[in-house]
Image (cartoon, rainbow, N blue to C red):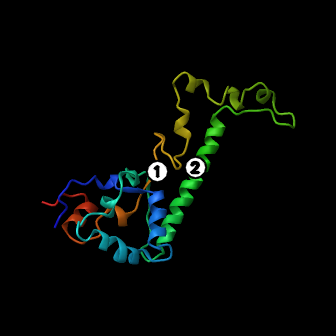
Amino acid sequence: MPPTRKLPGVENRAVSLRFLEAFAWEHDAWLRPTHEVVAEIVTPATVNLLEPFTSLLSQEDVGPATLFMSHAWSNPFGLVVAAARKFTSDAQNRQQQAKKKHSGGSQASSSGGSKNAASGRGKGGKVGGTSGAAKQGRGDTRAVEPIGTETRCGNEVFIWVDIFAITQHPGDAQVCEVWGRSAS
């Protein structure tokens, strides 16, 4: 039986890192191969709906994809979770470094520092970490900040993982989701 309600587009069925970690702990899935997680947890949980696992989740844990995860179903599911955690953690660190770099935090070093640093001017004559072009509206310093655990809109990163975003029940609905066609 195909889904009876309108589901969000497949690109809007990504899950939060919080959900991925909670799922792995709740189902003791860290060391289990992903194919086993699908066969023993995901598919049985959705068998009566014939919908993707994301249809069972709260709105806080599902959103538009900001990160796509590719993985091998023969590997432990925990590798997917660990990779997502590492990526978002590394990206968050890069984002914080970029914010510091562009925030105007230029200070004279204790070993003397340059004249520009001592005067509050950074490299290239920038004042306050923002170029004159950006101050005049010809640039956007946010554009150089990598996306970390938050998007530029301040929302959480959502990770697109096939086992949650696409129905795991073979048939027309699955084919349509994978290939983007309607079931008519």
* Residue 20 image position (x, y, % from top left): 45, 62
* Residue 117 image position (x, y, % from top left): 77, 30
Q: Which residue is mark 2?
A: 92
The answer to whether 7 is drawn above or below residue 46 in the figure is above
Q: Which residue is mark 1?
A: 157
Local packing at callout 1 (Cα closer than 10 Å; few below 14, some 14-19, many 20+) is many
Q: Nearer the viewer, residue 42 or 101?
A: 42
Q: Secondary structure at mark 2?
A: helix
Distance CA(mark 2)–CA(mark 1): 11 Å
Image point (46%, 77%), residue name: 32
Looking at the rendering, which quadrant does residue 113 occupy? top right
Q: Identify the mark nearer the N-term, 2 or 1.
A: 2
Looking at the rendering, which quadrant does residue 132 occupy? top right
Q: Nearer the viewer, residue 95 or 78?
A: 78
- Give the number of marks: 2
Image point (43%, 51%), residue name: 66
* Residue 103 image position (x, y, % from top left): 64, 33
Image point (64%, 44%), residue name: 97
